[in-house]
Image: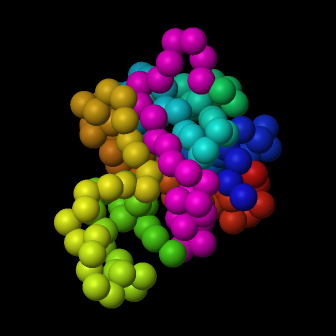
Amino acid sequence: MVNFGEKKFILNLIEALNNDKIFELQTRWFDGSILLEAGQSQCWLKVYRGKVIDSLNYMPILGYTCKIGGPPSAWQMLLDGTRCFRDLTLPGKRHFEDDPSLSQLGVMTRDIVIEGNMMEANRIIGGIYALSNCIVKVLKNKGG
């Protein structure tokens, strides 16, 4: 079960992100916050110059720069390798094993949504992908 609000997960994620060279490079000039959401669980990360400098297990009153959220089942698909982050966040369906009649062809939905300041989110998209890799690494190591 994916729970972004667990203190152990948050501490291990911060450590993984602050040691990840791709995350650091891609967020080097970012001064903002990223909210992770899996169902009701939340993890708010304050990022400055490529490092996570603060965190909370809820969204503070000041909000976030961008939010990456979806149901726990979507995050579980990322964790178990059923779907990659790109497939979960980009609109449209690419796997039709469960829909042989292609009835959902052209339906533009997402399992995990990136929202908020999309200019900033797109500017740090490489960092967001590195973040998703760190989430998987931490959860697979039972760090959350």
Asked if residue 39 shows in the view, the reply is: yes
Q: Residue furthest top?
A: 61
Above or below for 48 versus 99: above
Q: Is residue 100 left or right of residue 60?
A: left
Classify residue 72 by image quadrant: bottom right
Asked if residue 53 shows in the view, the reply is: no
Closer-to-camera residue (112/8): 112
Above or below for 66 versus 12: above
Query: Which residue: 59% across, 30% down?
Result: 44
- For the record, the magenta segment spans 59-81
Q: Is residue 36 magenta?
A: no
Report x, y in % for residue 33.
Answer: 48, 26
Q: Residue furthest left?
A: 106
Closer-to-camera residue (106/94): 106
Report x, y in % for residue 65.
Answer: 41, 25
Classify residue 60 by image quadrant: top right
Closer-to-camera residue (16/41): 41
Closer-to-camera residue (118/113): 113
